[in-house]
Image (cartoon, grey):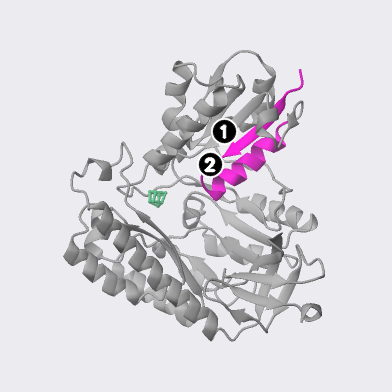
Amino acid sequence: MKKKVYFKTFGCRTNIYDTQLLKTYIKDHEITQNEQDADVIVINSCTVTNGADSGLRAYINSVKKSGVKVILTGCGAISKGRDFFDKNEIFGVLGASNKNKINDLISQDKAFYEIGDLKFIDTKIVSNYENHTKAFVKIQEGCDFACSYCIIPSVRGKSRSVPSEEIIKQIKLLAQNGYSEVVLTGTNIGSYGLKDKTTLGKLLQEIGKISSIKRVRLGSLEPAQIDESFKEILNETWLEKHLHIALQHTHEKMLRIMRRRSHTQNDLALFNELSQKGFALGTDFIVAHPGESEIIWQEALENFKHFNLTHIHAFIFSPRDNTHSASMKERINGDIAKERLNILKEIVAKNNYKFRKNQKDTLEILVESKKDGFYEGYDQFFNKIKIASKEDIAKQWINIKDYDCLEEYNFTRLDDEK
Ligand code: SF4
C-alpha cells in the first residue's frame, strides 16, 4: 500500500545530501513535506555530540506518540540504532550502505534491522535539489584521522572516494539541469582520492573544465590537504575565494592533545599564503578542550590573531561518549569557556567587516532566496548580501560593484529601487 513518507534530517551537509539520495529511491510511496501527514518518518540522524544523541531521542519520543513508523538511518543508526530497535522504539534501522532498499522496506510490515557495512560508496546521482540554487555532490565518505574528541570515523568508516569519472558525469548532468554552482561534500573531502593515487586538487582541475559550472564551493578541508595540486588551482575564477580549513586550535600543545595532524606554525604559514592571495578564510575551532590552561589559552589567542580569519565555526568542547577526550577528567569552567568563545567570535566578526570594507573586487553573487522582503545570496568570499529589487532576481547570477558594508552583511538596492 502506498504510504506517505516524511524525511527528517539532522546534522551536516553530507546528511542533507544523503537524504536527497534516499528520496531518489522512493518509487511506490509519496514523499510528504508535512510531518503530521506521514505514515512513515525516516530520520537521517547525526551523532557528533552527546547533545545530538539526546536530540534524536527526544525527536523519536515526540513523533512516536502519533503511532507513525520510524525508520532510523545516518550516523545515529550505527551508534544508537541497535539500542532503539531492541527496545521497540523504532520500526526499522537502515544503514547508509542499504539506501537502495528503502522503498521495499517501507512497503513491508515487518520490522527490520539492516545496518549494512561501512565500506560502501554511493555513486547514484542526485540530479535535482528542492529549493536550492546550488547542488551538492558527495565525493568522498569516511575519515582516516583519529582526532581525540571525534566519534565520526567509527560511524562513517574509513575514507573512500567516488571515482572521479562518476563525479564528472554527475556534475555534467547537474549542469544540464541548470545548476551552475556545486558544493563538494564528504566526511573529510581533503583526503579525496589518496588511496586511488589522485587528489582533490586534480579532481578540481577536471571539474574546472566543465564550462557551465561558474562556481565550485568546498566543504571543510584540513591544513595538510592543501597540497601542490590544490595550489595550482588557487587562481581559477571558478573556485570560490573562500576556503574553510579546520584548525580546531592555534596552540601546538592543544593540537597534540587533540591528536590532530597539523602544526600551528605550518597552519599559520598556509593561512598567510592564502590570505595574501585574497582568500576569505574560515575555520572550526574548539575552545575549552581539556588541557586548555589559562597560559595555553593566552598563547593560543595571540597566535589566533595572526590567522586573518573571516569566518568561524567555534564550539565549546562537549565530551562525546566513547572518545578519548571524554575520558580526560579535567574540565574548563563553563563561564570561562563562553568568554573564550565570544572573544574568538568577536575577533572574526571584526576581521570579516574589515575584509568586506577593503574589498575592491566586484561581488559575484548567486541569489538564492527572498526573505523578509530582500533577496539574499552569497558572494565569492562567502559573505552574505541582501538586495532590494523590484524585479524577481531569485536564482540569478548578478555582479555588484556598488553596495554598502553593514556590520553583519552587505546591502544594495538595484537601480530601479533607487
Ligand atoms: S578529521 Fe578529525 S574531526 Fe574531522 S571527522 Fe576526522 S576525526 Fe573527526
Residue depicted at 23% across the width and 54% down the height: 257
Where residue 127 appears, x then y in whole percent?
Answer: 73, 48
Mark 2 in CB contact with mark 1 (< 8 angstroms): yes
Asked whether the viewer can see residue 223, the reply is yes
Residue depicted at 78% across the width and 67% down the height: 393
Magenta range is 1-26
Report, in whole angstroms, how far the alpha carbon at label 2 lies from the one at label 1: 8 Å
Helix, strand or loop under label 1: strand
Q: Is residue 262 left or right of residue 216?
A: left
The amino acid type, in three-letter code, at marker 1 is Ile
Residue 90 higher or lower than 137, as above or below? above
The residue carrying mark 2 is 10
The answer to which of marks 2 and 1 sits earlier in the sequence is: 2
Where residue 166 appears, x then y in whole percent?
Answer: 66, 49
- Considering depth in this image, is 200 or 332 the residue closer to the camera? 332
Question: Which residue extends farthest top?
Answer: 110
Which quarter of the rendered picture does the C terminus lie within? bottom right
Q: Is residue 3 magenta?
A: yes
Helix, strand or loop under label 2: loop
Q: Is residue 338 magenta?
A: no
Residue 332 higher or lower than 117, as above or below? below
Which quarter of the rendered picture does the N terminus lie within? top right
The residue carrying mark 1 is 43
Where residue 310 appears, x then y in whole percent?
Answer: 46, 72
Q: Is residue 217 left or right of residue 195?
A: right
The amino acid type, in three-letter code, at marker 2 is Phe
